[in-house]
Amino acid sequence: MTMAVTVKSSREIHLMREAGKRLAETHMMLKETVRPGISTWEIDRIGREFIEKMGCIPSFLNYNGYPNSICISLNDEVVHGIPSKDRIVEEGDIISLDAGLIYEGYHSDAARTYGVGRVSPEARKLMDVTKQSFFEGIRYAREGCHLFDISNAIASYAESFGYGVVRALVGHGIGSHLHEDPEVPNHRQRRRGILLKAGMTLAIEPMINIGRCDVAWLDDDWTVVTEDGSLSAHYENTVLITKGEPELLTIEPAGV
């Protein structure tokens, strides 16, 4: 299958940097909203208003029918949880916030998983390993490496802890569209994949389960959960491929 992988122009990269900067600010703000007693609907409302006040458009709102601006997933929910006034965040939960925005026609996409108050050591370890698996993967996010070098590095790290790497969902290219070629798997691949070139932009997003890799969709046709009921964590950034170190367009200044 032929893929139309785009190499971004200097103008496009500038706009994507701006989109990424604004999304990083959004995530820093959203992190401060996470507390016991808040509803996922309220977090979504705050996130949407913040994005719109920056003159941007929430990427996810009405995307293929998704009804909200922030995907909010708790505990055994892997991704795409739908915010609700009835879904209340509780002490000990882990919560994944996946957000995207459009700035001057270009998208940014990033996700974080946080612990709510005091969480179990097992939950903390899962979140730490998921985040680090992203950084293990982007060691190969540079010109001259192959796409699946990223995938294999993510999988090798996460699986070394006995975790399940979600196979049914993958990362993706990103730019003037939220989802572009190529798909970026997080699980091991037999082939090497396409050769990476400076100017490509990817949304790299490990989704790691503390149990098996298997997932299922709830009746809302959006929320993805672990099939065995185990905890899941998600970590994502929009990444610019360069000739040297990758540029993380959605990373917060403190690197958290």
Image (cartoon, rainbow, N blue to C red):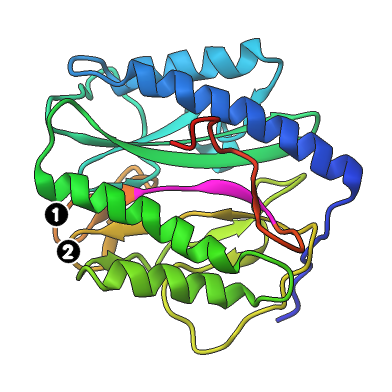
In this rendering, does residue 177 appear at all? yes
Label 1 or label 2, whichever lies nearer to me, is: 2
Please tell me whether residue 219 belongs to the stretch shown in magenta. Answer: no
In this rendering, does residue 224 appear at all? no
The image quarter containing residue 43 is: top left
Q: Is residue 210 above or below residue 58?
A: below
Which label was assigned to residue 211?
A: 2
**Separation of residues labelled 1 and 2 (CA atoms):** 8 Å
Q: Quadrant of the C terminus?
A: top left
Counting residues from the N terminus, which is met first, the one under dot 1 or under dot 2? 2
| Side of 30 where 126 appears, left or right | left
Residue at 75% across / 39% down in the picture? 16
| Side of 239 where 129 appears, left or right | left
Q: Which residue is mark 1?
A: 229
- SS at mark 1? loop
Image spot of residue 143 (x, y percent): 74, 69
| Side of 46 where 25 appears, left or right | right
Magenta segment boundaries in residue numbering: 234-240
Is mark 1 in CB contact (under 8 Å) with mark 2? yes
Image spot of residue 119 (x, y percent): 13, 36
Q: Main secondary structure of the magenta part?
A: strand
The image quarter containing residue 87 is: top left
Residue at 9% across / 41% down in the picture? 120
- SS at mark 2? loop
Image spot of residue 128 (x, y percent): 29, 49
Q: Is residue 256 above or below residue 147?
A: above
Badge 1 crowding class, 10 Å Cα cut-off, few under 14, some 14 to 19, many 20 or more, is some
| Residue furthest bottom in the image | 190
Image spot of residue 79 (x, y percent): 37, 46
